[in-house]
Image (cartoon, helix red, strand yellow):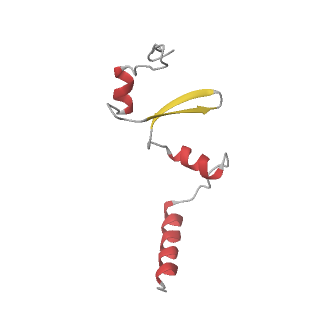
Amino acid sequence: MAIAQSKITSQGQISVPADIRRKLGVGPGSVLEWDEDNGKIVLRRVGKYTFEDIHRALFGNKKPKKITVEQMDEAIEKYIREKHGRR
């Protein structure tokens, strides 16, 4: 079921319904981006990407490797030690 509708003008312009503007957090001057995802058209505010969007852009459809917080902390610590030469 659609959450809102817009009508296209003869110049190809549309009005974004107020409910959608509020949900996206946009107003005058905001930039919206149109994208296609598995045959569906997606509208989003520019600069608002999910972790999944970023991961898909970097790694395609490969599943992210699951690690624990402790493993993440160890990897960060190792990186900092190597970067700054501290052992």
Front residue of 52/15: it is 15
Residue occupying the point 44% across, 16% down: 4
Instruction: State the residue in front, 6 or 51.
Output: 6
Closer to the camera in the image, 82 or 32: 32
Q: Is residue 10 above or below residue 47?
A: above
Q: Nearer the viewer, residue 40 or 85?
A: 40
Q: How many marks?
A: 0
Q: Residue at x 44, y 19 (%)?
A: 14
Q: Is residue 73 above or below residue 58?
A: below
Q: Is residue 37 left or right of residue 87?
A: right
Residue 59 on image: x %, y %:
64, 52
Identify the residue shown where x is 49% and y is 85%. Answer: 85
| Outermost front residue | 11
* Residue 54 drawn at (x, y percent): 54, 48
Say which residue appears at 47% left-offset and 76% top-offset: 80
Residue 81, horizontal then vertical, whole percent: 48, 80
Q: Position of residue 56 (x, y in %)?
A: 61, 46
